[in-house]
Image (cartoon, coloured by chain):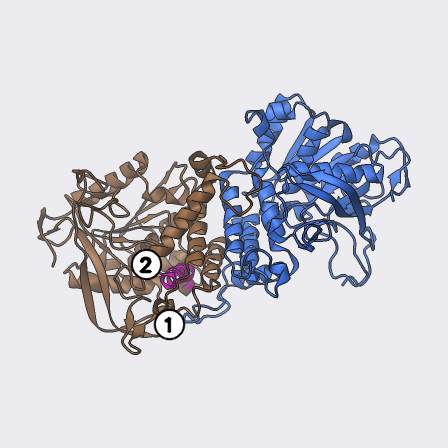
Chain colours: A brown, B blue
Amino acid sequence: MPEQIPPDSVGVVTPSSFEYPDAFLLQCGVALDGFTLVYEIYGQLNAARSNAVLVCHALSGHHHAAGYHSTDDAKPGWWDTCIGPGKPIDTDRFCVVSLNNLGGCNGSTGPVSVDSATGKPYGPDFPTVTVIDWVRSQALLADHLGIQRFAAVIGGSLGGMQALQWAIDYPERLATAVLIASAAKLSAQNIAFNEIARQAIINDPGYGDGHYVNTSTIPEHGLGLARMIGHVTYLSDDGMGQKFGRELKSGDLNSTQDVEFQVESYLRYQGQSFSRRFDANTYLLMTRALDYFDPAGAHDDDLVVALRRASCNFLVLSFTTDWRFPVSRSKEIVSALIAARKNVASAIIASEHGHDSFLLPLPRYLEVLGTYLARVADGLDSPATETPE
Amino acid sequence: MPEQIPPDSVGVVTPSSFEYPDAFLLQCGVALDGFTLVYEIYGQLNAARSNAVLVCHALSGHHHAAGYHSTDDAKPGWWDTCIGPGKPIDTDRFCVVSLNNLGGCNGSTGPVSVDSATGKPYGPDFPTVTVIDWVRSQALLADHLGIQRFAAVIGGSLGGMQALQWAIDYPERLATAVLIASAAKLSAQNIAFNEIARQAIINDPGYGDGHYVNTSTIPEHGLGLARMIGHVTYLSDDGMGQKFGRELKSGDLNSTQDVEFQVESYLRYQGQSFSRRFDANTYLLMTRALDYFDPAGAHDDDLVVALRRASCNFLVLSFTTDWRFPVSRSKEIVSALIAARKNVASAIIASEHGHDSFLLPLPRYLEVLGTYLARVADGLDSPATETPE
């Protein structure tokens, strides 16, 4: 727990809930009887309601992006590095909205929620949710908060895909889209890693028919494996080497089933702790949303055509050692934006830390993101004065 | 099945067995009461017995490297691309020895063998085997075959590690070591992927206590997952993209647990077929041998010192898109060999196919390997006249 909350933290924050009461037709054709989205707000909305920033989370993220839920919290929110007073997403200037996406397992409507039709948790029967569905539900949250237009929609990885979809679906409702370590669609390799993770979960007997919430079991091993695969592939080879080397924990060649290398014990710990705090059906759902994301698909695979509707400014960032969402994928987006005659800035950040770089306090990354967003803030109409409900 | 066996094939081959009758002390301290090694021979040993080539297999390989076991076989051995009359490892000039390593599951003594002490299969109790143990058992096989000195010891991946260990442990017993897509030790990332594969196997209830050979179950899902992880990481991102794209097999967003992308069905098939033909305990054992390989470890991590004993010539090959055993790892070996004042040739082969490249008929690869080995053959004493027992 922090001895004292640091001065550049947003401090103690309390989540809120948005209850959408009406039917919500998903892209897959299934309608939800309304939904709940849990969100947090950092900073104050200005009088012109023009300084709102939407933060979209990645695969295993949630609404708690910054600050602490209590002074006893050991760790702040998942993007505290970037969000706070004086930080790149500066809460002295912006009013940041961060939500748990539909289908999540941190309070928003998802597989662990009770299906009113059956009186039981949805589990595996929760309908398929896409990035398009997420963006549409986020727009309803924005309506609820009285935010007509975001100063910026920002996300890393799967979060960047949401920012891109925002630019396409609601061109008039954002001034800027910031896509960090993202892609316009997954590669076959990325889909393959997601598939292996799904297989690990589904084949765990703890998963059963997917209705494990009603039982005393969870697919602990399968979800742990999925997390381990994610973890290894979000780091770079060199970054892992520096972190772990290959130091043996034991010199005993005979302990074939025990942990021998430091990286092994680390991975097992990561897998176990993740499977206790995350819902396996949500993991399946989120990886599917990643796989299906393909805004160019509706335009004969022409991303330039898909982007024509967008009118916001774009910032596209990538990291040199990220091999799940490599620099080349960000370049594809930048090239398509240029061809579509959009206003785009981009930077390739040197980093040893692979895909995880987007969560880390890398000086050039923070500087580029902060400077760009400071210019966005400079262009806003009025100082912060008002807080949304 | 081949309509007709191609003229550049070694034809129909029959495996042989070498029974070593004496105690064999492994590096882990456990002694085996003798062992069996299954092997195949392609080509004829010359009068000077100087034209033998040892082929060492990788993780899931075996003795059947070339030719067919019968005219009904659908596929030839795993390295038929490189071994045969007129091929890079030219059986008109060389006598090729290919074995299933100790601990394997294709006939050599391993976890599926019966432990004479218990009358039951070893299963998970089979002792840890290292690359050093393999090389020593291969030297005993060479003694048995009357081969004092190999013209070349050749291997890809884990097989290249054996070739390197041969050069260090038996400098007088080989003229050439050919290391293809290999490394002097694994990176933390590689160990991490191996660990995830092991966790997938061990956590499969079909694995149980590892004595599944006595039961009707096998850890089919776990071993299948291990294979899928290997498969994806042995291919390059671009190579997978060209092979599969991301074509949907179904446009139905609601089939969350069914196969949606072509790459998914391919992976599931690969995983399933592998788990029916390979032993899970052998897979665990082989990955451990990979993880422990570290010839520099006994010399204060100084590979140059470790290589000083070697006296053979070296050929070191790597492939541009191989990210499990990347070009940089081969460069480390080459640099250490140069520093140790050894005779080394090396080439970096442009390929889109990742680590799997070493098994593929890439023209420049075949040309470099074939030309180098032709020079080795040119230096031999006498034509082929004799076959080992």
Nearer to us of marks 1 and 2 is 1
Q: In which quadrant of the rendered image does the C terminus of chain A lie?
A: bottom left
User: In front: A317, or A223?
Assistant: A223
Residue A165, label in figure: 2
Observer able to see residue B371: no
Direction front: furthest residue? B117
Spot occupied by residue A34 in the image (x, y as percentages of width and height):
24, 72
User: Which residue: 34% across, 44% down?
Assistant: A358
Residue A124 drawn above or below residue A367: below
Majority SS type along the magenta span: helix
Residue A307 drawn above or below residue B380: below
Residue at mark 1 shares a chain with residue at mark 2: yes
Residue B239 drawn above or below residue B329: below
Q: Is residue A29 left or right of residue A258?
A: left
Spot occupied by residue B219 in the image (x, y as percentages of width and height):
56, 60
Q: Which residues are magenta?
A: A278-297
| Subunit ID for the residue under disc 2 | A
Closer to the N terminus: mark 1 or mark 2? 1
Q: Residues within 10 Å of mark 1 (few under 14, many from 20)?
A: some
| Subunit ID for the residue under disc 1 | A
Q: What type is the residue that disc 2 sits on?
A: Gln
Residue with the mark numbered 1: A125
Q: Residues within 10 Å of mark 2 (few under 14, many from 20)?
A: many
Spot occupied by residue B73 in the image (x, y as percentages of width and height):
77, 61
Q: Is residue A374 left or right of residue A216?
A: left
Q: Does the stretch in magenta take in A290? A: yes
